[in-house]
Every structure is written in C-alpha cells, then in structure tokens.
Image (cartoon, rainbow, N blue to C red):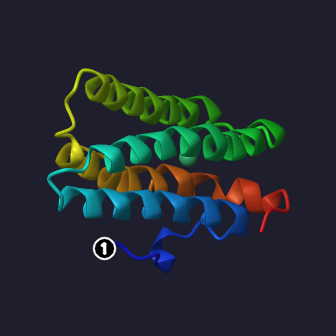
Amino acid sequence: MVEWDDKYSVGISIIDDEHKQLIDILNKVIYAKEHKDNQEEIRKILKEMIGYALTHFQTEENSMIKFNYPEYQDHKDEHHGFFTKTIAYVDKMIEGDFQIANDLLEYLKQWLVNHIQGTDKKYIDCFKKHGLK
Ligand SMILES: [Fe+2]
C-alpha cells in the first residue's frame, strides 16, 4: 500500500488531489495483484487510468498553455506516453491477457517517481508565479 506523502506534493491543491487518484489506482493494482481471479478488477483499473489520463493531463496542460510554460511539449509527450501505454494494456486485455498486474504496478510506481516527483515538479515555479495554489 502506498500512502500519500508530502514528497509527492506539487503544492497546488487541485493537482495534488488528482495525483492522489493515481495513488489510489496504484493501490488497486497492488490489491488486484494478490488475486488470481482479478479480471474485473483489472478492467476497472484500466478504465480508471483512461479517465485519469483524460481529465488530469488536461488540467495540467490547460495551465501550461495558459501560462506559456516553456516545457509544455516535452511534458505533453510524457502524458501521451502514459495514455499510449494504458491503451496497450487494454489491447492485451482484449486479447485475453489479464496477467498484467505485475507489469502495471511497476509502470505506475515508475510514473510516480519519474513523472509526479520529477517532471511535474518542474512546473511548480511557473504555476505558482501565475497564482495557482
Ligand atoms: Fe504531468
């Protein structure tokens, strides 16, 4: 179980709240991993990941556009990578492969470290300068 920690915070409440959803999804994967018969859980998790990608990335990207964030394109590319990866998992599932929990968990853990604790932190100064809190 991964719990929210200040080290994940970007200090902007709407974004932190959405990042908490990602941790929630990650914990659902940990839970699903413990079950053999987890097809329904995996299906729901992938659906949530798509929802997360469509709403949360929009939140960040809208601010980036509005504030003329210089690293917008690179950041957007990383978001696109997450979406593409999620769709690849959906494809596997459609093909009947539900043995993806381990892989999915590793991917989400990496996302938490590399993107949320890495790439996302870079926009903090820019977003705060423009009044987000
Ligand atoms: Fe991001």
The quadrant of the rendering that contains the C terminus is: bottom right
Q: In this view, does 35 lie to the left or right of 59?
A: left
Residue at point 77% right, 35% down? 65
Q: Is residue 53 above or below residue 19?
A: above
Residue kind at label 1, given as amino acid type: Met
| For residue 75, above or below residue 1 | above
Residue topped by disc 1: 1
Tell me which residue sits at (69%, 60%) in the image. 125
Q: Residue drawn 36% across and 29% down?
A: 90
Image height check: is 11 above or below 116? below
Task: Measuring from the top left, give residue 9's x and y in whole percent.
Answer: 55, 70
x, y percent for residue 36: 14, 53
The answer, for residue 22, to whether it is visible in the render is: yes
Residue 108 drawn at (x, y percent): 34, 51
Q: Observer-nearest residue: 92 or 3?
A: 92
Q: In the rendered view, would you say 115 is above or below 43?
A: below
Query: If the image is split into quadrants, where does the N terminus sit?
Result: bottom left
